[in-house]
Image (spheres, rainbow, N blue to C red):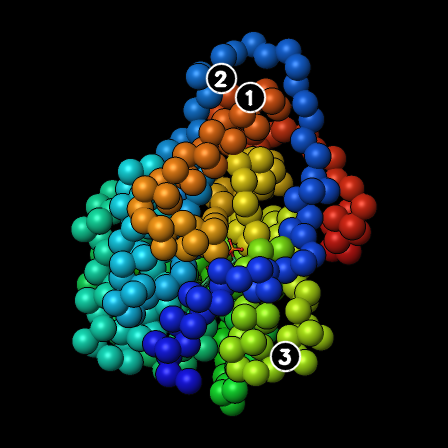
Amino acid sequence: MKTEKRKDAHIELAQKKQSQFNTSTLFNEVKLIHNSLSFFEINEINTKTEFLGKKFSFPLSIRPITGGTEKSFELNKNIALACEKKGIGFSLGSMRTALENKNKLKYYKLRKYCPTVFLEANIGALELEKYSAKKIDSFLSETEANAVSVHLNSAQELMQNQKTKGFSKQFKNIKNFAEKSSFPVIVKEVGQGISFETAKKLNTTKIKGIDVAGSGGTNFIKIDSILHNKKSLGKTFGEFGIPTAASVLMTKKAFGKKIIASGGIRNGLEIAKSIVLGADLTGIAGPVLWKAKKGGKKVEEFLEVLEKELRISMFLVGAKNLTELKKKKFVLQDNLLEWKNYT
Ligand SMILES: Cc1cc2nc3c(=O)[nH]c(=O)nc-3n(C[C@H](O)[C@H](O)[C@H](O)COP(=O)(O)O)c2cc1C
């Protein structure tokens, strides 16, 4: 199946209930401590942060979704405009289509809709074998990106019909790319989560951050097993992955640089919990896509709800800003405790 056709099919399928995990992110097993007696007003709360040199009005970045087609351009435009309005980060989807065909570059030129935001571009780790750092950097300059995320997606690839090779070279290629590129490099998953061991290995490279993209939200094992008629594989592996809350805890232990919590984050309380567990930023993809189809205003309204919920969460735990929120104590329960104890 051609890259562009697959991308449009992903957009359609990602909105269906059967494309989500049934098992949770385990944020439900993180309990924050309620503070009844506040010494400040809710309007005194400051949710601002900085990430890799760029300012955010609250710690959220829309994760890579799509790019390279006319349809994707319209969706990304709606998202980019809303991110600019709300002062949060935005990411283009995989640049592969433009690397394969220069005529498609125009579909990634979104900077004019979000002139001040932290803009990321995205590429698959497997593509690093094919394209030089120079060629990728040229795409980053043309799209005026601030950084690039490189996605690891072995589970997804194995659900597709292509005979994918090159998994064993991914680490070496990421390491070399992070040394050669003039842009900050972030490594991300796409919904199966980053383990303690992977984070530890990545900590030896020059990458600047990890986006854990754990399990509990959008599920590419399910999406691609449906798309490529591999229903039996989808059934066997459909709940495979590291729950997002567990992946944040592990990555925090093993990786000394920036951490983005994402994968199944669906409300502002989960944003607050991510920060308490050690994330610097959080991310959402699937639900934003569903809103973007209905227009930029819907994305903006959704972002406003998330910001408000984060603010309420901070008030309820007595944190006036994100530095204070990071220091708050928490309780871990049941399964999450087991994940934590394994490292
Ligand atoms: C339709 C769709 C397309 C996606 N395409 C990409 C992609 O090109 N590159 C990438 O790194 N992640 C991609 N993702 C994965 C997201 O960036 C994110 O890691 C994942 O969806 C988990 O977050 P969520 O549960 O909030 O959706 C895509 C997600 C969706 C829904």
- Picture residue at 49% right of the left edge, 12% below the top: 41
Of callouts 2 and 1, the N-terminal one: 2
- Residue 114 in the image: state x and y as whole percent: 25, 47
Image check: 301 left or right of 144?
right
Does residue 332 show up? yes
Disc 2 marks which residue?
Answer: 42
Q: Is mark 2 within 8 Å of ligand 1?
A: no
Residue contact between numbered discs 3 and 2, judged by CB atoms under 8 Å: no
| Residue 149 numbered mark, or none | none
- Picture residue at 22% right of the left edge, 53% below the top: 111
Above or below, 6 against 310 in this view is: below
Disc 1 marks which residue?
Answer: 315
Secondary structure under the numbered disc 1 in the rendered image: helix
Secondary structure under the numbered disc 3 in the rendered image: helix
- Quarter containing the N terminus: bottom left
User: Separation of disc 1 and disc 3 at Cα?
Assistant: 45 Å
User: Separation of disc 3 and disc 2 at Cα?
Assistant: 49 Å
Secondary structure under the numbered disc 2 in the rendered image: helix
The amino acid type found where label 2 is placed reads Ile
Residue contact between numbered discs 2 and 1, judged by CB atoms under 8 Å: yes
The amino acid type found where label 1 is placed reads Phe
- Residue 298 in the image: state x and y as whole percent: 37, 43
Image check: 85 left or right of 185?
left
Disc 3 marks which residue?
Answer: 231
